[in-house]
């Protein structure tokens, strides 16, 4: 990324000196401030990459199975008059795929079956993801962290929230926050100090049988990745076949990336 870090640090100092009141009455001031600082840190970044190690529960033949995947995520937003761009690569038990947004189209490549589909989307990451999830018929929790205003996205449906405490996540000391919505509980761990990046996310689906969880451990945050244009361009590999996106109610290539 660029000389973003110095500017972000100044922004954080300003936010600490003056914090807007919580948007949700049920969220305590400290939890709101920490989540807002995290959102501001990501919101003011033009370019970053991170890694998400994901585990999620699904019931298979009456048994709760913990599936896993690893996602490598890179985005560029409003940098040097370039279009918004996004690249996501996922390797997991159920899926192996790549998602590429070049500012005009979104391409989903199923690497196991060597199939890909392309759809036109708006030029901003937020609208592009909204359109893609509408076409695909589903969304994924970790996507909230690449929207232009992560704080507003995360806090939107929250009914209550508080600070649980502090402890290390993979050796990095973090604030532990807990929030509740109508049908889910979620927790997030935010790094303590001048770089408040999220380090862990846990979602519990209270209304689902067995209260399954989605767990993402977030690492390798890089705000100066210096990615080339080639990284955000999809070139079909040898033997790849292009297919059409099916309507949401019909089966897709596979499930949406976890």
Image (cartoon, grey):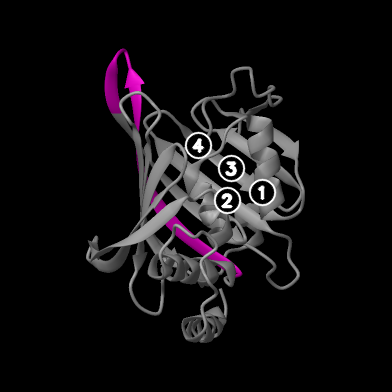
**Tag 3 near tag 2, CB within 8 Å:** yes
Identify the residue position indicated by label 2 in the image.
87
The answer to whether residue 238 is seen in the rendering is yes
**Picture coordinates of residue 233 (x, y %)?**
66, 50
**Tag 1 near tag 3, CB within 8 Å:** yes
Q: Residue at x 48, y 48 (%)?
A: 142
Q: Is residue 51 left or right of residue 23?
A: left
Q: Which mark sits nearer the N-terminus, 3 or 2? A: 2
Q: Is residue 184 above or below residue 239?
A: below
Q: Is residue 135 left or right of residue 24?
A: right
Q: Is residue 56 above or below residue 159?
A: above
**Tag 3 near tag 4, CB within 8 Å:** yes
Main structural element of the magenta stretch: helix, strand or loop? strand
**Tag 1 near tag 2, CB within 8 Å:** yes
Q: Residue at x 39, y 27 (%)?
A: 208
Q: Which mark sits nearer the N-terminus, 3 or 4? A: 3
Measured in 3D between alpha carbons, the distance from the residue under mark 2 to the one under mark 4, in whole angstroms, is: 12 Å
Q: Residue at x 47, y 50 (%)?
A: 159
Identify the residue position indicated by label 1 in the image.
101
Query: Residue 257 has which mark?
Result: 4
């Amino acid at each position: 990324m660029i000389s973003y870090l110095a500017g972000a640090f100044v922004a954080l100092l300003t936010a600490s000196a003056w914090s807007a009141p919580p948007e949700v009455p049920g969220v305590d001031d400290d939890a709101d401030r920490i989540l807002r600082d995290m959102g501001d840190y990501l919101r003011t970044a033009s370019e970053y990459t991170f890694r998400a190690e994901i585990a999620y529960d699904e019931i298979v033949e009456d048994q709760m199975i913990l599936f896993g995947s690893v996602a490598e995520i890179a985005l560029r937003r409003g940098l040097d008059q370039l279009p918004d761009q996004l690249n996501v690569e996922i390797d997991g038990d159920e899926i192996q795929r790549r998602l590429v947004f070049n500012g005009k189209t979104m391409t989903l490549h199923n690497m196991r079956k060597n199939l890909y589909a392309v759809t036109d989307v708006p030029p901003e990451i937020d609208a592009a993801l909204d359109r893609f999830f509408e076409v695909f018929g589903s969304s994924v929790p970790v996507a909230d962290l690449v929207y232009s205003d992560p704080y507003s996205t995360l806090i939107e449906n929250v009914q209550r929230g508080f600070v649980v405490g502090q402890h290390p996540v993979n050796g990095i000391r973090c604030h532990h926050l807990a929030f509740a919505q109508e049908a889910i509980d979620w927790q997030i761990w935010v790094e303590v100090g001048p770089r408040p990046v999220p380090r862990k996310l846990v979602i519990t689906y209270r209304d689902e049988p067995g209260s399954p969880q989605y767990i993402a451990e977030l690492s390798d945050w890089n705000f100066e990745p210096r990615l080339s244009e080639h990284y955000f361009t999809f070139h079909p590999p040898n033997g790849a076949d292009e297919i059409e996106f099916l309507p949401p109610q019909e089966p897709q290539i596979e499930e949406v990336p976890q």
